[in-house]
Structures are given as C-alpha cells and as structure tokens.
Image: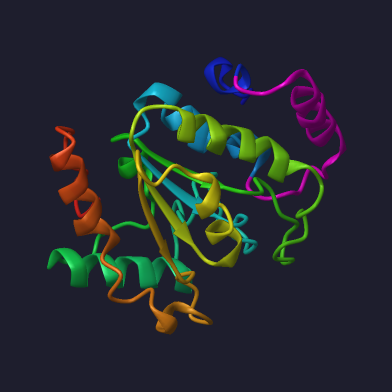
Amino acid sequence: MPLPTAWASLLSGAQRAQLQHLERSLPMDSLPPRADWYRALEAVAPEQVRVVILGQDPYHGAGQAEGLAFSVASGAWPPSLQNIFKEMCDDLQCQPPFQGSLLPWAEQGVLLLNRVLTVAPGQAGSHQGLGWEGITASWIDAMNQGRSKAFWLWGKEAGQLASSIDSEKHLVLTAPHPSPLSSWRGFFGSKPFSQTNEWLASQGLPRIDFAGI
C-alpha cells in the first residue's frame, strides 16, 4: 500500500526520495509484509491522532509484525505485548483481551508508530540506520507541532525524544521498554492507560477504550 497522502505531505523532498530508495532497495522478505509497512499511518490520519505510542522496530518473528507497533494480527503474543496487556489490566482493572491486534486502538486515534518500519526476518534491529529514523522523526515532530496529545515513550530509544516534545502542551509519559529485559525496572506500575484517559478527559477529549479489544 502506498503511503497515505496526508502523511507524505509532512515529509521534505529529500525524505520522500529516501523513502522511495528504501521501497526499492529493501529485500522483499522484510517484515512486516510490504503491504503493511504503512499500516499505522493508514489507520489514523494526522489530524485524528490523540495518542502517540512509539516502538523501536517491528517484531522479527514469522507472522508477528502487522505494521502497528507492538501489535500482532494472530498467534502467540510476544513477551512485550504480554507485558503491555498485564500493565493495562492491572491499571484499568480489566480482563485480558481476546486478541493481540491493537487496530481498535488505532481506530480511536492512537498512532502506533515504530521508529524503524521494517526488519529482516529473525534479526532484531537489522534495519536501523538505513534512513527510517529521519522519516519517522518528521512525523513525530509534526505530531508535536499539532494539537495537544499524549506521547508514550517506552525504552531508551523513544525516551531520547522526550526533550524535543513540548511537555507544556502534551502529556509525555516515559517508562522502560515493556520487553522482559527491562519492564521490571519501572514499566509495571507506570499506569499510562489511566493517566492518559484522565488527561484526555481534562482536555475535553473522548477517552480511549483500551480494554475493548
């Protein structure tokens, strides 16, 4: 699927050229499937975004990545997603969801954006440094420049962006990555779900039904 026009318009000419280079040069077996590279951007238009959740790069296991950060279309939940759902249920006092796809979040205005949109099968982080970071940084900056919204910055890579986001206008929540390697350091108990819904309500905006997936 092509990049939606509304998101393409937020890139410079050089960034659009870099994007075309990536589309031509990356292997066909890159994950997620090529048709899902821009799925996070297809699911929500820039003006509809109320929450931005930043991931690092897609899941690298077969059949996992579906173009939405932290989300899986079917099958077993990766450990990071399991921890996200554990925190959600502890925070909201809800039952575990029936599916691993976070598309219902995206349909309510949650941008599930990875800093790097592709990965080689079985090789985490393999497409870092190829040019995705500058492209996604432009979209993040556009979200910062736009109306008030909540940013969830999980992990070291995402946390480095905190200083570039206007915390007086936006709700900026930082926490360790939900991976089992770091989640015990403070991801559990960070309560991003309830904090965000309380903040949205204070802004006169509808809450996100996070548990309704």
Residue at the image position 52 percent from the left and 29 percent from the top? 142
* Residue 16 lies in the magenta-colored region: yes
In the rendered picture of this protein, how many numbered marks are placed on residues?
0
Quarter-of-image position of residue 123: bottom right
Q: Is residue 72 magenta?
A: no
Q: Quadrant of the N terminus?
A: top right
Q: Nearer the viewer, residue 166 or 206?
A: 166
| Residue 63 visible to an observer of this rendering | no
Q: In this picture, which residue range is highlighted in magenta?
A: 10-32
- Compared across the picture, whether 107 is left or right of 3 comes to left
Give the image quarter of residue 124: bottom right
Q: Residue at x 28, y 35 (%)?
A: 108
Q: Is residue 38 above or below residue 100?
A: above
Q: Looking at the picture, how far across and down is residue 188, in whole percent?
A: 33, 76
In depth, the one of 174 and 108 nearer the eye is 174
Q: Is residue 175 above or below residue 18?
A: below
Q: Residue 190: horizontal and vertical position, in percent?
A: 30, 70
Where residue 44 appears, as percent x and y from the top left, is 41, 29
